[in-house]
Image (cartoon, helix red, strand yellow):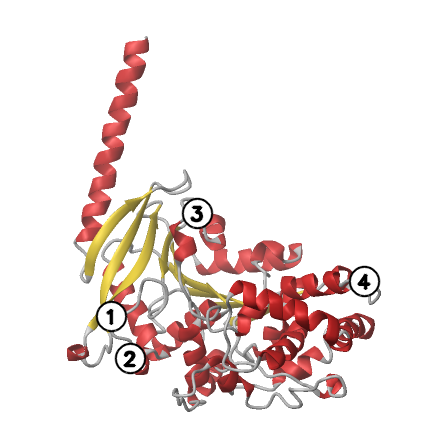
Amino acid sequence: MRRIFLFVFVFLLVISSVFASEFESRLRSLPGVVSVEKLNTVDFFSEKYLVFFEQPLDHSLPEAGTFKQRVFVSHKSYNSPVVFVTEGYSAEYASKPNYINELSDLLMANQICVEHRFFGKSVPDNLDWTYLTTSQAAEDHHKIREAFKQIYKTQWIATGISKGGQTALLYQMYFPKDVDITVAYVAPVARALEDGRHEIFLKNVATKKERRKVLEYQIEMLKRRDKILPMFEAFVKNQKLNYYIPLEEVYEFCILEYEFAFWQWVGDVTKIPSKKSQDYVLFQHLLAVSHPDYFSIEGSKETFPFYYQAARELGYYGYDTESLKKFLIHVQSAKGYFKKVFLPKNMNVDFYPQTAIDLENFVKQKAKNTILIYGEFDPWTASAPDIGNNQNVIKIISPRGTHATRIKTLQKSQIDQVMGLLSKWLQ
């Protein structure tokens, strides 16, 4: 009996390896693929691979050169739908064996996660920022989609979170026939480098009492500047952080950023220390919510390509200093802060507003089978696109939700609505 069991076990292993090598050989044969490496994965998928595609820096000008783009492929079944993750940043997280996108889990789907050009390991040898555009990124996704249609002939669902969600919407705009469904989580569409709508949003978020508690913390941090700033300076020195602006300004910007970051990620005012708390407690809370590495040169090293994109096409948010004006010393106005804080002085970038205009018009008029998911408290919701009367797009806002809002965190009625639409569109 033991011998029979061993024989069956070995036989199953051989069959499994044959299947794996068959799928791997198909990956290797795809146009544009330059390397394939097998990775460990969980039982949800049968196989997982790290694949690098060779991409043109400029899809309309091949002689401009190429770079290698990192893609993680998790295979479940040739007959299952494909969740196409249009990551907006590095996709390092997707290298973990247990990474399963929410939609892959809900739809029992294959998963292809594409790292955004110029992020993570998808960086050309010679950086030329002029090639970092939304249209070039969409071309990257289209080329990968075209290659994989040789393997997967089922439905495709584009998805992403935050900048990745925006990337998914842009991908649909540039290539509306590439995917069957788009699910964009907490995706902003900013109309300017310092958009202006987020400040208005923050004046009305939650309740007056809750907003007051956030403001009181900010005021307390500025009132106790003489005691807390030395802690701040010592921490920055210990962390070896450097900035484009003086440290006194960094301190005030961290306190201005606190309001945005708190509603983006926390949203629960019971987490805010009392005004009577010790200096160290107040300082530790700042580190937890609005860490000084956010404004540092070192802290932005991995995300710097985004700052370039924000300055050029994607936009960002501003700060309203009015409520803190009599407590601020170095930052009386935050107007024009973005370039001063995040970009080196020798980088001159002009904002191109047409991308946001085109995307908003597309969502409102032409987008199909699209689900937009936002959190009620998340300031990025202020720049959610207007869906107008487009019956093919639905916008769902999770009550008291933050930037961590996902399908599984929605109310049951909202989950049922989303799953009903997905089921209908996948028929």
Name the amino acid, label 2. Answer: Asp
Residue 390 x/y as whole percent: 52, 77
User: Between disc 2 and disc 4, whose residue precedes?
Assistant: 2
Q: What residue appears at the point 44 percent right and 49 percent down from the top-left corner?
A: 99
Relative placement, left or right, of 152 versus 389 is: left
Are the residues tagged 3 and 2 within 8 Å (C-beta)? no
Are the residues tagged 1 and 2 within 8 Å (C-beta)? no
Name the amino acid, label 3. Answer: Met
Label 4: which secondary element: loop
Mark in front: 4 vs 3? 4
Residue 322 x/y as whole percent: 72, 88
Which residue is nearer to you in this view: 229 or 378? 229
Residue 225 x/y as whole percent: 73, 75
Which residue is nearer to you in this view: 61 or 103? 61
User: Between disc 1 and disc 4, whose residue precedes?
Assistant: 1
Distance from the alpha carbon under mark 1 to that under mark 2 = 9 Å
Label 2: which secondary element: loop
Residue 404, image quadrant: bottom right
- Tag 3 residue: 108
- Tag 1 residue: 125
Mark in front: 2 vs 4? 4
Q: What residue appears at the point 52 percent right and 82 percent down from the top-left corner?
A: 341
